[in-house]
Image (cartoon, grey):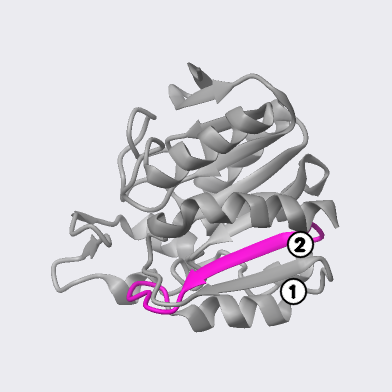
Amino acid sequence: MPRPFRLDLGDGHFLAGDELAGDGPTYVFLHGLGSVRQGVKSTSLLAHAQRSGRAFVRVDLRGHGESSGTIGLVKPSALIDDVVRLLQRLGPSVVVGSSLGGLVGAMAAAACPQQVVGLGLLAPAFGLMNGLADRLDAHGQLRTSDGRSFPVAADVLADARAIDERSLPRRLAVPTLLVHGTADDVIPQQVSERFFQALTQPQKELWLVPGGDHRLADVADAIWPRLDALLAR
């Protein structure tokens, strides 16, 4: 069974997570905006890791769950830096990110390619950061896909606009699986289609799930064998 751990980041900040010992490379799961580490998809990946004898880690991003910080006050660049710190601790990893976790995971993989051997991007929220201000309501609140809303600080919006997503596909040099539902009403499937076309890494795959929603929980168990097969090519 996985055991809880804490990664200290300095200045009183930390990530809370669970880790399962096993063979490498480690599966690393990153959740979406407003979510937490213990969900349907991370639990499915944990079960897959247990069956395969593989190491597994999942964390609450800063501002979420049991980790430090407050959602809406944590800069996106800090989320990316946190994951880079985590990957440096773990060594070679297969990073799996859902929605915001997909964006953060891909940016972290580009920042430390020596630590990442593969990417699984599930309805990745590309375009979210650069257009974050446009998603706020009249009261400056951002609403998540599960109906939660919170204010976003001005310095967070400025930091989000500065995230370089345009060059990201060219900076990724690892095998990448993109999974996106055709009925996703949060991030359109065309976002993943465009990203897939822009990837210069030839070891890549795009799975468009007919009728799939943003969460992709119904097909979670089918994702991991696809990802393993891509990495084995």
Q: Position of residue 157 (x, y in %)?
A: 39, 63
Which residue is more in the foreground, 99 or 23? 23
Main SS of the magenta segment? Answer: loop
Residue 84 as seen in the image, left or right of residue 137: right
Q: Quadrant of the C terminus?
A: bottom right
Residue, x 70% and y 28% (percent of image)?
90
Query: Going by the image, does 188 lie left or right of 35?
Result: right
Placement of 40 over or under 128, stated as above or below:
above
Q: Secondary structure at mark 2?
A: loop
Residue visible at 61% across and 82% down?
194
Q: How many marks?
A: 2
Numbered tag placed on residue 69 in the rendering: none
Which sits in the foreground, 159 or 173? 173
Q: Position of residue 171 (x, y in %)?
A: 77, 64
Image coordinates of residue 70 in percent, x first then y, are 30, 39
Task: Decide whether residue 184 is among the magenta residues.
Answer: yes
Q: Nearer the viewer, residue 79 or 175?
A: 175
Marker disc for residue 199:
1
Q: Amino acid at mark 1?
A: Leu
Alpha carbons under labels 1 and 2: distance apart: 7 Å
Contact flag, marks 1 and 2 (Cβ < 8 Å): yes
Q: Give the extent of the magenta segment.
A: 173-187
| Residue depicted at 19% across the width and 54% down the height | 148
Task: Tell me the residue that label 2 is attached to.
Answer: 172
Residue at (61%, 31%) from the top-left corner? 51
